[in-house]
Image: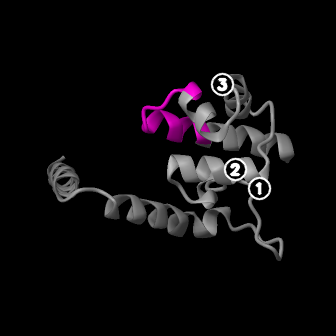
Amino acid sequence: MEDNFNKHLGKKLRIRRLSLGLTQTKVAQAINVTFQQIQKYEKGTNGVSSNRLMQLAEFLKVPIIYFFEDFKEFKDVAGTDISNESNEDLNYSFLSRTFSSLSKTQKEKILQILSNTSKIERVG
C-alpha cells in the first residue's frame, strides 16, 4: 500500500505543480530540497514526510487532503473505505475554495464557459 500511495501522491504533486506552471526547481527551493528530490517524490520513488507534505500543501495552496483524494485505499479511522463515498465532498471543497480565491473577472469567465457548455449539451 505504501508504494501505491507514494505513486499516487507523486501524481497529485505533479498535476498541481504543472497546473500552477511551476518547475521542479521552484518547488524544491520553496521547501528546501533539491529538484532531484522533487523528481523522486513525483515518481513515487521516495515517500514524503508529514512535515514535507505540509510544506508542499502550503506552497501549492491546497489542503493536505488534496494528496489523499482519489486514493483507492484511503480508509477512515474505522477502516471503512471512504474513497468513493466522500470524493465528491473533497473535490467540491477544493473547487469551492479555489473558485472563491479568483477575481470577479475570472469567476465571470468560468461561469460563462459553464453556461456555454450546458447549452452545447442540450443541443448535442
Observer-nearest of 58 and 82: 58
The amino acid at mark 2 is Leu
Q: CA distance from mark 2 to mark 1?
A: 18 Å
Q: From this viewpoint, which residue is outermost toward the top?
A: 36
Q: Which residue is mark 2?
A: 53
Give the x, y percent position of residue 62.
53, 55
Q: Is residue 14 magenta?
A: yes
Stretch in magenta: 13-25
Left or right: 26, with 95 as reference point: right
The amino acid at mark 1 is Glu
Disc 1 or 3, which lies upstream in sequence?
Answer: 3
Please, what secondary structure does the residue beneath circle 1 have? loop
Observer-nearest of 50 and 71: 50
Q: Which residue is mark 1?
A: 73
Q: Is residue 37 magenta?
A: no
Task: Name the residue rendered at 60%, 43% in the picture.
Answer: 12
Q: How busy is the neighbourhood of tag 1: few (under 14 within 10 Å), some, or many (20 plus)? A: some
Mark nearest the camera among 2 and 1 is: 2
Q: Are marks 2 and 3 in contact (CB under 8 Å)?
A: no
Q: CA distance from mark 2 to mark 3?
A: 16 Å
Task: Using the image, tell me which numbered label, if any, was put on residue 35.
Answer: 3
Give the x, y percent position of residue 97.
41, 64
The amino acid at mark 3 is Phe
Please, what secondary structure does the residue beneath circle 3 have? helix
Q: Magenta stretch: dominant SS?
A: helix
Q: How busy is the neighbourhood of tag 2: few (under 14 within 10 Å), some, or many (20 plus)? A: some
